[in-house]
Image: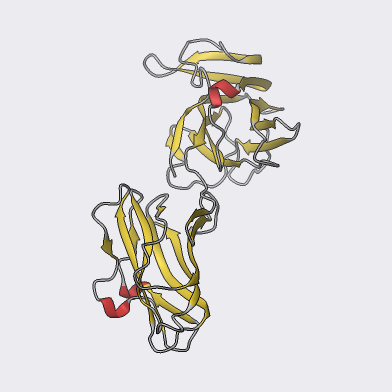
């Protein structure tokens, strides 16, 4: 996933003070070298509001929150009490709000979380949900808070970053429709191409779809509403640069291209027979190689490509 710059001002006390934050019982301490960090007392808070001008274009998918913190008095290994946390409150132009809480606890020591010397990193994804296309984000409130936390909480930095990826809806061109789903969620990306009406071998390639991040592809499915008669339907899958150049089939051997047999409605191919590692700087689209006979070529073709994150 691709995220933008940190939207928070003075996120790591780099100014040497608490400017841009509204605080209660928060001080700035000197760190290593010329660095600083925030120290929240056992019951304290600090917050700031991010404006629409800072946010810029509203994200399609989510924001990522990262906080590097240290519990002044470390919790016991199995102590799950949450006495320090970050709240992200997203206010929408229709009056609705979305709230997310990120706990500052010892938690599970996983790779990348333990920064050494007692410092921990926690990340969370804050999904955005718009009631309609006309709804915008009015503001984002970022609040760090403690409550009865022994000796308080140290915060080295906090970041909130906007996801720069976009969800592509339907792209329509002539009798072809292309769509992509699953981006930015726990589900794998799915590319769907539909060619409406009767098929023709000389039809131009379908609308290309950009690959959102490096993915692996498991299977490719193709199916039609009206079966071909006389010949099989054969489809190739093409990868190309974003400008359409350097296009090539994903199949080293053309016998493995997705096929719907004469008189049938369905076909599939597994990644044992094609290049399944796709880079994010590419686009993908299908190309019709063969259809049924002139009178019954097959109709309403759908190609579905199921990906996974790599």
Q: Which residue in the rendered view is the most extreme toward the front?
A: 295
**Residue 71 location, quadrant:** top right
Residue 302 pos. (x, y %): 49, 70
Of 210 and 302, which appears nearest the observer?
Answer: 302
Of 254 and 293, which appears nearest the observer?
Answer: 293
Circle count = 0
Q: Is residue 307 left or right of residue 143?
A: left
Of 165 and 81, which appears nearest the observer?
Answer: 165
Quadrant (top left/top right/bottom left/bottom right) for the N terminus: top left
Q: Is residue 269 above or below residue 181?
A: below
Q: Is residue 191 above or below residue 87?
A: below
Quadrant (top left/top right/bottom left/bottom right) for the C terminus: bottom left
Residue 84 pos. (x, y %): 65, 31
How is the model colour-coded? Answer: secondary structure
Residue 91 pos. (x, y %): 69, 30
Q: Is residue 182 left or right of residue 2?
A: right
Q: Is residue 40 left or right of residue 306?
A: right
**Residue 133 location, quadrant:** top right
Using the rendered image of the protein, determine whether residue 85 is visible from the camera's viewpoint: no
């Amino acid at each position: 996933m691709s995220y933008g710059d940190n939207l928070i001002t003075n996120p790591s006390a780099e100014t040497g003070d608490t400017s841009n934050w509204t605080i209660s019982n928060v001080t700035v301490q000197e760190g290593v070298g010329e660095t600083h960090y925030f120290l929240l007392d056992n019951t304290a808070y600090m917050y700031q509001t991010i404006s629409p001008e800072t946010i810029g274009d509203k994200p399609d998918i989510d924001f990522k929150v990262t906080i590097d913190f240290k519990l002044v008095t470390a919790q016991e290994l199995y102590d799950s009490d949450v006495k320090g946390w970050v709240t992200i409150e997203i206010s929408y132009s229709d009056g609705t709000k979305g709230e997310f809480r990120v706990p500052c606890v010892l938690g599970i020591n996983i790779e990348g979380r333990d920064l050494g010397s007692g410092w921990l990193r926690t990340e969370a994804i804050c999904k955005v949900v718009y009631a309609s296309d006309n709804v915008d984000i009015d503001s984002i409130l970022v609040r760090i808070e403690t409550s009865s936390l022994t000796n308080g909480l140290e915060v080295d930095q906090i970041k909130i970053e906007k996801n720069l990826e976009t969800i592509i809806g339907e792209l329509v061109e002539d009798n072809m429709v292309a769509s992509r789903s699953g981006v930015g969620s726990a589900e794998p990306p799915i590319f769907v191409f539909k060619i409406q009406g009767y098929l023709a071998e000389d039809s131009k390639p379908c609308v290309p779809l950009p690959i959102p991040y490096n993915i692996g592809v498991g299977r490719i499915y193709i199916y039609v509403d009206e079966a071909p008669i006389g010949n099989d339907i054969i489809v190739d899958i093409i990868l190309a640069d974003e400008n359409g150049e350097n296009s090539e089939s994903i199949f080293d051997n053309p016998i493995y291209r997705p096929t719907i047999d004469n008189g049938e409605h369905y076909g599939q191919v597994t990644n044992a027979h094609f290049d399944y590692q796709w880079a994010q700087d590419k686009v993908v689209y299908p190309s019709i190689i063969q259809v049924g006979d002139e009178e019954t070529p097959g109709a309403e073709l759908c190609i579905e490509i199921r990906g996974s994150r790599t």
